């Protein structure tokens, strides 16, 4: 590799690494004969490039707009924050940078307490632990979400009950949530998927009437608010993600758990870090740097290890500074797309609850071609094959996955989701998406819809 290629930003390198992994797994494919610069073009989202296609569908040639591997490149200030930790931190974990990041994040979202963890899945695992989930308990989860919204609860023995989506907002339907409550229901997971706020006022009111814990999955909803209040602070627990595909990332992985309960906050550090705590009494008898006590923090749970490293925390504090500005860019780009497509009645967008701030984490739309006997797959074929737009389908209904079926959670009653999902699709989307990419996508979509009208 040339010296100049070694210094490429993270999102370009990610495209290269992805191709290398694909080649290792598929050494005999045509894609194996790619040029290094083509993988860099994929990371950069270069128009008119011939691109390798690790999806397994063969070589993707001629795409004008594709999905990037990362939401945005790191700034020099963010890179320097990580370098400073490497040079100056006394330890690489559980130190002053974690403490600062937790305080910064709590202030940003308006939470009483915030705890850094290594990913959002384990933030949800903490929520499940503090909901005191036992085998046989039921947890209501929207069927339209990423699998991690449900897995931590199933891992503790809960039976997952699938809630339908609201036909307008595409998030959990409060009415269906209430219909599916039984005496075994222990918690509900409200997922602010795609950056769309759930109807938290109704969800919390219903849950309180029935004595049910409310967990908010905010993995895709940083800076998402309702009447100025940040999501994640309405229910009992809020869980956030700093994965590479999110609005901000702590070196590819990371998460945050927020709560307002003093007793929960007292117990989180021990649960998060192997039950470690201070010895009581004569500590001078021990070599303090090497010794700490290990104790039980909850009677029904073993401790875990969900720690977030110091370099990740330093980067997180720095990235928080740009979250609102980056989201404002995406909100404005969403406004432009809606304006460009306003005269295409076959295409609809998510509705937003009153007072809600939609931060547009991913760009999903719905196509209704029933008048012409067409469906989403017809549309995607035209978009990808004729107009060069890499449109895809995301978030399979969870009850259709073998995992949940094999775990006894395959039963469902979600007619709205079944009808809606079969005609939903996603546009490429990233922080700082440019007008030219959006123009190509929208013009391609307009032409494809017209073609399907006949």
Image (spheres, helix red, strand yellow):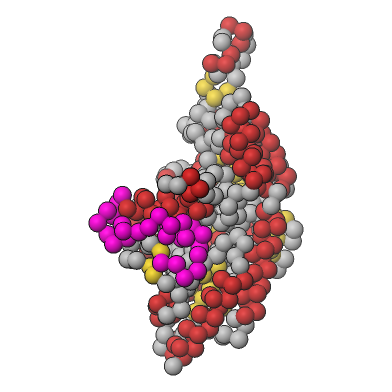
> Is 229 within the magenta?
no
Residue 427 x, y percent position in the rendering? 51, 70
319 w.r.t. 439: above or below = above
Residue 284 showing in the rendered view: yes
- Which residue is at 45% across, 63% downward? 395
Query: Which one is nearer the viewer's eye here, 180 or 393?
Result: 393
Residue 98 visible? The answer is no
Where is residue 217 drawn, in percent x and y?
Answer: 56, 53
Image coordinates of residue 201 in percent, x first then y, are 67, 60
Check the image and name the residue furthest to the right. Answer: 228
Q: Which residues are magenta?
A: 24-50
- Residue at 40% x, 55% y is 36
Which residue extends farthest left? 28
* Residue 26 within the magenta-colored segment of the rendering: yes
The residue at 57%/61% (across/down) is 430
Q: Is residue 246 left or right of residue 100?
A: left
Where's residue 328, x and y in %? 69, 62
Above or below, 186 against 441 in this view is above
Q: Residue furthest bottom?
A: 454
- Residue nearer the viewer, 133 or 365: 365
Q: Name above or below for residue 168 compared with residue 241.
A: below
């Amino acid at each position: 590799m040339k010296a100049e290629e070694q210094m490429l930003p993270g999102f370009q390198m990610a495209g290269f690494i992805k191709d290398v992994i694909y080649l290792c797994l598929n050494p005999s494919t045509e894609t194996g004969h790619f040029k290094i610069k083509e993988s860099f073009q994929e990371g950069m989202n270069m128009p008119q490039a011939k691109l390798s296609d690790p999806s397994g569908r063969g070589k993707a040639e001629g795409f004008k707009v594709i999905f990037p591997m990362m939401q945005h490149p790191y700034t020099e200030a963010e890179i320097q924050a990580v370098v400073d930790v490497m040079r100056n931190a006394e330890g690489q974990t559980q130190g002053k940078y974690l403490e600062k990041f937790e305080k910064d994040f709590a202030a940003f979202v308006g939470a009483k307490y915030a705890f850094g963890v290594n990913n959002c899945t384990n933030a949800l695992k903490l929520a499940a632990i503090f909901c005191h989930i036992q085998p046989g308990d039921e947890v209501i989860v929207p069927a339209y979400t990423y699998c991690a919204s449900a897995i931590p609860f199933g891992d503790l023995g809960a039976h997952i009950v699938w809630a339908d989506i609201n036909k307008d907002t595409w998030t959990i339907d409060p009415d269906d949530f209430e219909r599916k409550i039984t005496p075994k229901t222990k918690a509900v997971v409200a997922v602010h998927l795609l950056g769309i706020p759930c109807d938290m006022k109704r969800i919390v009111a219903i849950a309180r009437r029935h004595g049910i814990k409310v967990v908010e999955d905010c993995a895709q909803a940083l800076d998402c608010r309702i009447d100025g209040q940040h999501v994640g602070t309405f229910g009992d627990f809020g869980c956030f993600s700093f994965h590479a595909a999110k609005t901000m990332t702590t070196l590819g992985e990371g998460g945050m758990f927020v709560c307002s309960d003093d007793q929960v906050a007292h117990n989180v550090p021990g649960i998060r870090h192997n039950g470690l705590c201070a010895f009581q009494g004569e500590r001078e008898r021990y070599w303090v740097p090497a010794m700490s006590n290990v104790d039980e923090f909850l009677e029904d749970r073993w401790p875990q290890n969900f720690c977030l490293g110091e370099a990740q925390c330093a980067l997180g504090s720095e990235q928080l500074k740009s979250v609102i500005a980056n989201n404002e860019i995406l909100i404005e780009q969403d406004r432009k797309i809606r304006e460009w497509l306003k005269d295409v009645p076959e295409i609809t967008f998510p509705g937003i609850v009153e007072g809600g701030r939609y931060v547009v984490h991913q760009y999903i739309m719905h196509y209704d071609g029933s008048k012409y006997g067409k469906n989403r797959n017809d549309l995607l074929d035209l978009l990808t094959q004729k107009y060069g737009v890499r449109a895809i389908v995301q978030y399979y209904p969870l009850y259709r996955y073998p995992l949940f079926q094999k775990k006894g959670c395959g039963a469902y009653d979600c007619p709205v989701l079944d009808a809606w999902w079969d005609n939903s699709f996603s546009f490429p989307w990233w922080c700082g998406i440019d007008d030219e990419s959006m123009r190509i996508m929208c013009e391609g979509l307009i032409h494809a819809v017209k073609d399907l009208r006949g």
